[in-house]
Image (tube, rainbow, N blue to C red):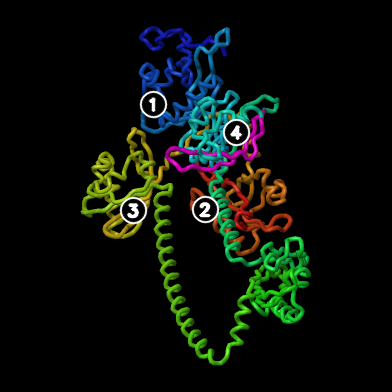
Amino acid sequence: MTSESPFPRSSTPYQSQPKSDSQSILDALPVVVWQADTQGQVISLSARWQTLTGRTPTDSLGKAFWDAVKEEEHSRQQWQTACHRQQPFVIYFDLCQNNGIPQPIVAQGEPLRNEHNQLTGWVGTLQPTNTLTSSQTELVYSQKFLQAVLDSLSNGIVACDAQGVLTLFNRTTQELHGGPCRPIPAEQWAQHYDLYQTDSITPLAHNDNPLYQALQGRSVQNFEMVIKPSQQPPRSILVNGEPIIAEDGHKLGAVVALQDITQRKQTELELQNSEERWQLALQGTGDGLFDWNIVTNEAFISLQWKQTLGYDDHEVENSFEGWRQLLHPDDLEEVAAALEAHLQQNMPRYTAEFRMRCKDGSYKWILARGQTQWDDHGQPTRMIGSHQDITRQKQAEQKLAQLNQELESRVNSRTAELEAVNHQNKALLAQEQIARQQAEAAKAEIELYERIIHKIQLGFLVWHSPDLERGETLQLVATNPAAEHILSTELHNRIGHQMREIFPDFTQQYPHILRLLLQVIQEQHPRSIENVPFTLPNGEENIFSLRAFPLPGDCVGVAFENITPQKRTEAALSLIEQRYQTVIDRVKEVIFQTDIHGSWTFLSSAWTELTGYDVGESIGRSLAQLVTSETEQQKWQDVFNHFVQEKGAFLNHKIEIWTKDRERRWLNIRVVPLPNIDGITVGTLGAINDITEFLQT
């Protein structure tokens, strides 16, 4: 598009002057026609604008244009991002009509260029979505569907366009970074979004950024880094990314998937520490270890086991036969009987004392202990145990046997004393163990409570009522960090203050809400309070959902969350489908859609990799048909039906299924409702994650 605009060429388009023919034509159109400068500032609006908003075009130019837009800051950011890219765009936002009801609007824009292809401004239209054609309505629905799919993923998704401008953050990415997507150049990504190398100290270099690598045309596989938002704890992230290439080979941008592996890293560290403790414990006991594979007759015999008898590692064969050859012939029959009794499960543990030949030809007494594993048919498969050198103990026993009878009474007396001391020690140890368990239980309970209060994503406030007839006198008793974040208000230093001091406007405007909180205390019954309006300190209007419940001492707990609707996507369907299809194909989770009865209507290709069933043969079937037992099949169907009928917001469920090869797999299923354009639930969509290996670990 060139700079030949249909607008009148005037620096003040709506001054009192006769309308041109072209302006009269624009004013007669059933849509708002707008024009903006190179920075995206609106400089002209057609007369249809006043019909939609009740504001005159002359009073709505420049920054005043955004006074008529609901969620002004978010919508302005979409607009500026689109203008920065200097490409045709389609975005969606709500206009505030003169009757106070938000009107969904689709905004379309085209760049104006001169003969040198330089940007000279913008021109476009604003049109209510209820006037769109069926194909346009389908575009809106598809965009909502794709955005819902992305927001249901547990992985974060980030994408940029071919110029390196960030264009997509899904909900998980925003949670990881603690903020929304910003249209900043690639060289500022690492600094703005707090990206670090795995040492959590060294900032991630611009050229090492995985999204930048993908933008350069490289495939990024299993790249690890750390995100350190200022208001959140550091998170270890595993990144995979690919460039986004159109069918004609033209590069459209790049996309990466972010997997939070913080818990896995902590588990690996704990396993490493546990392994080190185990090795130190073995070295401290001085015992030798053996691990005997009964099926193959192979065995692992530790070096310390061999060194106890004076052998080097290579001088004793690692097998049952290598052990048997060193056994004293006189002890062979008794040891074989003890071993057979244990292998036949007549004895719960293997214990035996015998002599073994040392390298110098002498014999040492050995105390052997072991435990066996059996298969499903009761056949022994593996034994693990230890050898302890008790030669000195045996020698002491022999010397004690040689003592004359004169010492017997002294020995018996000393034995009685030792038994009394041992009994006393055992009693003390038992008391200490009970005290330690009680302390650990109390500590765990306190830590659990603190984690719930401080880590929960819902806002949480506790109020005390000194006067059950006056709601404005409610005093703040406790809060959590999420409450301060959601309300954008510091509350921890307002403990003890009354509600009318902390939230004066809310107290005056909504006294009926305060009366409901007092009723919860008086009636001692919890209550849900929906659609509660609240104005943040920055003037932004939000809607909250409250759950109030009685607490001891004339107190009421209030858990709340922001339920302000999510906004529509920012890009046209053709470009979104290419980008998002690339995202879905890269994600290892199964993305699905069902009807209201639970039958599949859509499955991503990861379904075949997970279950062995082709997508085509699975469409129209239900997940319940793969569940391993009839009881669990009915349980899943009941849970699904209840979720759909009760119009739940989110469902997270674990279930065990059969694959096509009759392999058991554990799945974690996350489901959200799928509404049609009228808001009626017509099915569900979500993601399936294979957690079999995680549960086994």
Q: Are marks 1 and 2 in contact (CB under 8 Å)?
A: no
Which one is nearer the viewer's eye here, 192 or 472?
192
Q: Residue 556 has which mark?
A: none
N-terminal label among 1 and 2 = 1
- Out of 95 and 429, give the one closest to the viewer: 429
Is residue 569 inside the magenta stretch? no
The image quarter containing residue 12 is top left
Figure check: 506 above or below 301 = above
Frontmost of labels 3 and 4 is: 4
Disc sitting over residue 210 in the figure? 4
Residue range (magenta) = 218-245
Q: On residue 557, which mark appears?
A: 3
Task: Locate residue 205, reporting x and y percent.
Answer: 55, 30
Q: Earlier in the sequence, mark 1 or mark 3?
A: 1
Q: Which residue is the site of mark 1?
A: 68
Sequence-wise first label, 2 or 3 = 3
SS class, disc 3: strand
Residue position marked by numbered label 2 in the rendering: 643
